[in-house]
Amino acid sequence: VICIDDGVKQLDLLRNHIQNQIFSRIDFKYTKKQPDKAKLLRSKLESSIIIWDKYRVSYCDLETIHLTDEQDRLSFIQECLVNLTKTRIEDLRLLQINI
């Protein structure tokens, strides 16, 4: 179990906000005129969220297998979570613009 610090929690709040904006944009742009496309886009976004969350945790945990000191390991995981989350936020912002 990975304990998430306040910095990661704040980034997760921002990430969730952007994801919600993308859902809203999909609804606004496609639901009335192209409901099948809206459903497909929502489904793909939901899947990507679930998969990315699992990836982030497992990747950061795996990257620490060489560390033996628990404090070093926790610090590395926190930094890794922050870096991956910042990258994801930027990716979501680009997606938001292109939908």
Image (tube, helix red, strand yellow):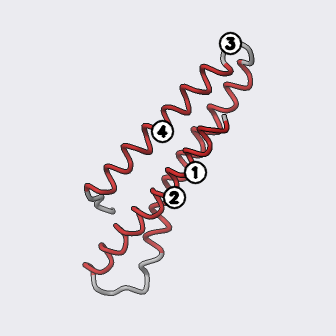
In the displayed orientation, state which residue is furthest to the top.
32
Q: Determine which of the numbered discs, if any, sits on residue 49 in the image.
A: none
Q: Is residue 24 left or right of residue 17?
A: right
Query: Which residue is identified by label 1?
Result: 91
What SS does tag 2 mark?
helix
Which badge, 4 or 2, comes first in the chain's sequence? 4
Q: Position of residue 44 (x, y in %)?
A: 65, 39
Which badge, 3 or 4, comes first in the chain's sequence? 4
Q: Position of residue 49 (x, y in %)?
A: 54, 45
Q: Is residue 8 left or right of residue 15?
A: left
In the displayed orientation, state which residue is furthest to the front.
97
What distance separates the C-alpha of mark 2 from that of mark 3?
32 Å
Q: Residue at x 45, y 56 (%)?
A: 85
What distance separates the C-alpha of mark 1 from that of mark 3?
27 Å
Query: Which residue is identified by label 3?
Result: 32
Tag nearer the camera, 1 or 3: 1
CB-based contact (under 8 Å), mark 1 and mark 2: yes
Which badge, 1 or 3, comes first in the chain's sequence? 3
What SS does tag 1 mark?
helix
What distance separates the C-alpha of mark 3 from that of mark 4?
22 Å
Mark 4: which amino acid? Ile
* Quadrant where the image shows the C terminus: top right
Q: Determine which of the numbered discs, if any, sits on residue 87 in the image.
A: 2
